[in-house]
Image (cartoon, rainbow, N blue to C red):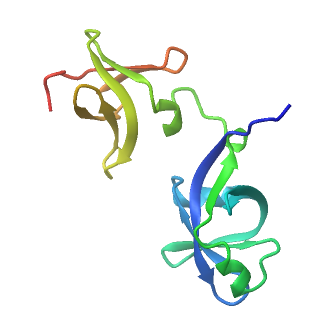
């Protein structure tokens, strides 16, 4: 029996950094340095996922760099450019009550307090001020993800989000 591992893509290897095998890293985690908390990354190389141990990780200017086990020169680092970086979902830290990973909200049904279905969460986006639910239904709606103001309840079991939102508001 084959075990399926759910992977969470956290970033990408961008390019070599220097001559010692370091790589520049793009991180989708928030804060961006959280990608460095994982000591083993899974890299997608030639269509297959490969475990790679992170020997060292640090900020460099406004970016991030990593030293990976077995990558000792610029040519080896160049071969990793473009590889997605993932971790097994089981490696993600447990969240406190009332906290959610974005991935948990994707596909959830969104209803108003009056029970009007607005659609499902397609994705979330950052605006700087707050995160925004992008809801696809009969039309796209953008609802600020502000708990107790616009988002009143998130039911992970029922896969439903209740919002205080006028369905006629664009």
Quarter where residue 66 is shown: bottom right
Give the residue furthest to the right: 1
- Asked if residue 93 is positioned above or below residue 98 in the image, the reply reads below
Residue appearing at x 77%, y 77% in the figure: 71
Residue 79 lies, in percent from the top left, at 68, 76
Give the residue furthest to the top: 114
Compare residues 94 and 161 and report the one nearer the observer.
161
Residue 24 lies, in percent from the top left, at 59, 75
Query: Can you see residue 39?
Result: no
- Position of residue 155 in the picture relative to residue 54 (left or right): left
- Position of residue 8 in the picture relative to residue 146 (left or right): right
- Position of residue 130 in the picture relative to residue 167 (left or right): right
Q: How many labels, in total?
A: 0
- Asked if residue 144 is positioned above or below residue 29 in the image, the reply reads above
Q: In which quadrant is the C terminus drawn?
A: top left
Residue appearing at x 69%, y 86% in the figure: 74
Query: Can you see residue 114?
Result: yes
Q: In which quadrant is the N terminus drawn?
A: top right
- Position of residue 85 in the picture relative to residue 32 (left or right): right
Residue 76 lies, in percent from the top left, at 73, 80
Residue appearing at x 48%, y 19% in the figure: 159
Quarter where residue 55 is shown: bottom right
Residue 87 lies, in percent from the top left, at 68, 50
Residue appearing at x 38%, y 35% in the figure: 122
- Asked if residue 54 is positioned above or below residue 21 in the image, the reply reads above
Compare residues 78 and 150 and report the one nearer the observer.
78
């Amino acid at each position: 029996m084959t075990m399926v591992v759910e992977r969470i893509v956290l970033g990408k290897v961008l390019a070599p950094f220097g001559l010692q095998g370091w790589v520049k890293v793009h991180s989708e985690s928030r804060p961006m340095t959280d990608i460095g908390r994982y000591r083993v990354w899974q890299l997608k190389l030639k269509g297959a996922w490969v475990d790679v141990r992170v020997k060292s990780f640090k900020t460099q200017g406004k970016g991030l760099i990593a030293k990976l086990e077995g990558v000792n020169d610029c040519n080896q680092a160049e071969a990793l450019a473009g590889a997605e970086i993932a971790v097994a979902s089981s490696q993600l830290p447990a969240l406190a009550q009332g906290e959610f990973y974005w991935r948990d909200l994707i596909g959830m049904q969104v209803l108003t307090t009056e029970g009007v279905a607005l659609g499902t969460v397609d994705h979330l986006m950052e605006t700087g001020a707050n995160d925004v639910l992008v809801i696809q239904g009969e039309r796209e709606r953008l609802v600020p993800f502000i708990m107790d103001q616009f988002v009143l309840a998130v039911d992970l079991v029922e896969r439903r989000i209740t919002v205080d939102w006028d369905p006629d508001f664009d």
